[in-house]
Every structure is written in structure tokens, then in C-alpha cells.
Amino acid sequence: MLNLPYELYSAEQTRELDRLVIDNYGIPGAKLMSRAGGSALQALNYFWPEAQQIVVVCGSGNNGGDGYELARQALVDGYHVSLFEVGSVEKMSAETHAAREALKAVADVIHRFEDKLPTADVIVDSLFGTGLDREVEGRYASAIAAINNHHPTPVLSLDIASGIHADSGKALGVAVRASVTLSFIGLNKGLFTGDAPDYCGQICFDSLLVPSAVYQAVKADALRIELPQFSNLLSPRPRTAHKGLYGHLVVIGGDNGMPGAARVAAEAAARVGSGLVSIATHTAHSAILNQARPELMCHGIEQADDLAPLLDKASVLAIGPGLGQSQWSQSLFARVIDAEIPMVVDADALNMLSHTQQKRDNWILTPHPGEAARLLGCSSSEIQANRFDAVQQLQQRYGGVIVLKGAGTLIYDGKLPVRLCSAGNPGMASGGMGDALTGVIAGLLAQRLNLTDSACLGVLLHAMAADKVAEHLGERGMLAMDLMPQLRQLVNLR
């Protein structure tokens, strides 16, 4: 239940998985519903072992049927259960209606939802499944409000927190704020990005014992990334290794008032193993940038032509951290953007890129939603409304590999499936975190990883390092430089 699969599916794909299980493998829908109810009961026992009073809130779809099954099995198991119906009994599927009748045969605990819910140890949200594609309104919106108004009573959502779009993660007007979401048969890609991380709580999964062969018939839309997938990229170095084997990264940025951004990116690259790291920055502070980290080579750049010797030596470029928008900044961007060297483009360099028609195969772009909006000529709210669509549009327009940052960072190289990082935490919402990510990705790219692996592993290491910091010291007050010891530790895991 706590070990999540890598594969992530659209709502249409999960419906197809259900169909294949029923039609091709002869497992009736009622049997799946019974298994889902039993799995939900196990989740209750695991997360809230002291709970006795359970309130279940059901819609009329098959998701509601899972709720009826849970209620019946919980009653048999000795729980005190109250169930509140929101949907129409007449619109129920045959399986859901049968589950309702089976519950009625055990005890008279079914009530019509009016406007509020009674006191409970746990509330179970069984209102909507993964097929919701419209704004929540009317009695359903009232039921969701009633669930949320019971805070801090914990909430278990079945399949997905009701009100969240299963494909995009967008909250459709209102949504349940779940403590735990238990997903069945196939994880939906919208569980991990968009608004969903604020609503779905801890994600758990149960395949309901469906045959493993069913997953071979439906190719996942997206894949979660975890460190074991990239363990071969972090193998021990040969005893004869030397710095020349691990690349020379040149970080370009740090206009007046912003030298720290380039410094953060450069140290992050060094900490993940780049052989050499240089900073090309404003002359005003080039002499002091490496005083606390003398291993970094800092070069004062007065004009764009001063970059030529560094570009001749560089194996990878990272442009953007603290670059600014000044005339100096724009001249450096214009000089670098046509270089044939692989590069990572971030921050102000992305804003400048939005005014060009550049497209190339050997770069990694790392926009946050605001930068992505400028790159696509739309609003950041439109980006967040469908991040999967946005990351694919960005790749089609600009080429290379796109890293769309945010909760549930997405990585896309033009070939499905999209990759998604479910690690990370809100402590990362501080200045310099994006610069650290740029350095991590560029440092891996300098070590001859390909673009996709550099982007995926870089995003994952960055997020995991932040999670380690949060685990020991908490989220609030986390700074980008706090990640450096953790990054070094993670790239040396065996």
C-alpha cells in the first residue's frame, strides 16, 4: 500500500485498465468493489488504529460503491459507521446499487446528506472518482465543504480527493482536503502535480490483486522518478579518475546585486561531481565570489567577447542564475545562445529566450510557471491548469529537454512518457533553490550524462536533498546552501 508504482495514467487509461480486468480477466466489477472496500478498511486500521466512529460520504458512481463496501465491512469489523448519500440512487450502476443493498442488509446506517456531518474519528470521502471533468457545485460542493469544515478530523479519500481533476491535478472549484488518498489499480497522473499536492495528502496504492499482465496492455502517460531507476548513473568512479573526465562547467550570470545566484549554482555543480566549475560574472564582484569556496574559478566579464576563452574550454554551460536584464546581461545572452555547447538555461535567460524563436536539441530549459507562461505567451494560471500539456507545448516550441518546476516537477524530452518527481517539499520555496537546481543538472550534464538523465536525476537529487534537510531541521527557513552536504551524500550512495 505504501510502495507506489512508477506508472501514472490518465483517467481514460485507468478506465481502460478497469475494463480489461473485467472483460479480459473475468474479475467482476462487484469483486473489485469488494476488494477496494477491504483495502480502504486496512488503510483505516493502519493510519488510525484508535478510530471507532467512521463517517462515509458517498456519491452515486462506482467510487461511491467503494464507500458502501467499506461501510459494510467496517460494520462487520466492529466500527460505528454512519453513511451519508449525496448522489441519486436512481443513477447508480448495478454494482454500486448492489453494494448499497448489501450495506442495508447489515444495518440501518444510511442517511441523506443535508448540510453538515456528525462528529467522527475519520471521514471517508467517496464522492467522486477519477472521471470528474466539471466544476463541483450544488449539493456535492456543500458535502465537500462539510468534510473540510470538520478539520482537523482526518479524511481518507478513495481513488482521488474529490474535486481534483485526475489528469491535470487542478481543483475544480472546491475539493476535499484529504489526509490520505488511497488509489486503486492505476495511479492517476493528476495526483502529484497542479493543485493536488495541497489536497491529496499521503498517496497510497493498492492494485486490488489484478493480473500484472493488464498493465502491459496500456502504456502509461507518465512515470514517477525515484533514485533506484538511476543507480547505474552513480556507480563508483575508477581509481584512475581525474578531473578532466568529469567536464568543465561554465556558469554565466551574477549581474550587479545578484552574484549569489551564480555562486549557488556553481557550488551545486561541484557538489554533484563536476570536474571543473568556472563562473563568468560581473567584474565588480568576480574577485570575491570564490573567497568562501576557492575551488571555484571566477572570471570577470566586462563585455561579451571576454567569454570567448571560457567558451573554448567549456564542455557545458549554465546561463541565467542572477543574470539580470541589463545591457550587459543581454549581450552575454546573445553571445552564448548561439554556441553549440550543451547548456542549461534558467531564470533571466529564459525570459530573454521568450523573445526569440530559438529551438535546439542540446539544451535543458528549467522554467517555473511564470517563466513558462512567458515562453508560451500565456498566463501562469493557464500553465498550472494543465502542467502536462504545458510541458509538452514548451518542448515542441523550444526543443531539448524541459523541466517545468513546481510541486510535482515535470520533465519532458519530446518522447512519451513525461517524467514526474513526487519528492520535494514547501521549504524549497526560497530564493536560490532554482539556481541550485540549475547547478545540479548542469554538473551532471558535464559528467557526460545525456540530457534526459541529467534533467531527471538532477531534479530528483535536488528534491531529495531538500527532503533530507526538512526531515532534520524542518521546512521553514530552508536555504539553498543547506542542500549542499545532502547533495554530496546522495551522489555517493551505494
Image (cartoon, grey):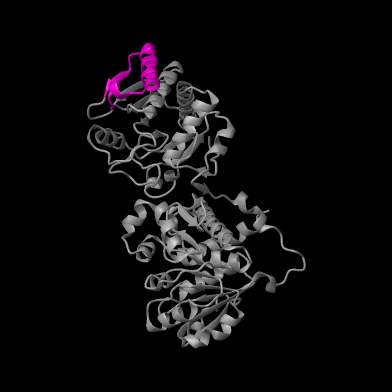
Residue 183 in sight from this viewpoint: no
Q: Nearer the viewer, residue 37 or 272?
A: 37
Q: Is residue 44 magenta?
A: no
What residue span does the magenta drawing correspond to?
86-112
Q: Nearer the viewer, residue 415 or 244?
A: 415
Residue 97 in sight from this viewpoint: yes
Compared with 96, 291 (above or below) is below
Tag count in the figure? 0
Q: Position of residue 49 (x, y in %)?
A: 47, 28
Q: Is residue 93 magenta?
A: yes
Compared with 382, 330 (above or below) is below
Compared with 68, 139 (above or below) is below
Where on the picture, by quarter, is residue 53? top left
Q: Position of residue 477 (x, y in %)?
A: 43, 59
Q: Position of residue 107 (x, y in %)?
A: 36, 13
Identified at 56% across, 81% down, the residue is 311
Q: Position of residue 392 (x, y in %)?
A: 44, 56
Residue at the limit of the structure toward the right, as seen here: 240
- The answer to whether 236 appears left or right of 477 in the picture is right
Q: Nearer the viewer, residue 163 or 222?
A: 222
Identified at 49% across, 26% down, the residue is 22
Where on the picture, by quarter, is residue 460? bottom right
Identified at 26% across, 36% down, the residue is 141
